[in-house]
Amino acid sequence: MSRKARRSASSMFYYLQKVYWRLVTLKPSTILLAGLAMAASIFLLGGGIYDIVEQPVVAFVSGGRIIPFYPQALNEQLLGESVASMILYSLGIIGLVLMYQSTKYAYSPREAFTTLLIGLLLFLIGWAIVEFFLFPSTIRRL
């Protein structure tokens, strides 16, 4: 083996060893990990896997009009329903995070109450609309 080939092989080994050591000692931020966990749960709960696998229709359009769609089985869904549920789950989680953050404003009761009220409002709006999506007939009976 030539001297140049040995030197490049040893430098490549040294480079890979440095990269491996950086990956092993990597400590990501807890906020980043929590955000990724929340995003993954919203994606899964909102039906992201179904959207990727089934590739549902965006909307039924005929002659320039949107046709209402009521699923007859569990495996029928439009893409808009999935996206809307993901947005509503995000709204609820943002509300929960705001309610948690309101505890940090103990020195300013007005700011704490405002943050708590906005968080509670966002959470309740997300929860109520998701309940309407899941059980539309119970809302109509009220």
Image (cartoon, rainbow, N blue to C red):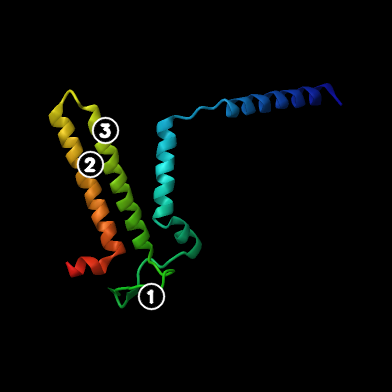
Q: Are marks 3 and 1 in contact (CB under 8 Å)?
A: no
Residue at point 44%, 46% (across, down)? 40
The image's mark for residue 101 is 3
Label 1: few (<14), some or many (≥20) within 10 Å?
A: few
Going from N to C along the chain, the mark reached first, 2 or 3, is 3
Q: Are marks 2 and 3 in contact (CB under 8 Å)?
A: yes
Residue 93 horizontal/vertical position (percent): 31, 44
Up-down relation of residue 36 to residue 73 (above or below)? above
The amino acid on which the numbered mark 1 sits, given as a three-letter code, is: Gln
The amino acid on which the numbered mark 2 sits, given as a three-letter code, is: Gly
Judged left or right of residue 76, residue 12 is right
Q: Secondary structure at mark 2?
A: helix
> Label 2, on which residue?
119
Going from N to C along the chain, the mark reached first, 2 or 1, is 1
* Quarter the N terminus occupies: top right
Judged left or right of residue 106, residue 62 is right
Up-down relation of residue 50 to residue 121 (above or below)? below
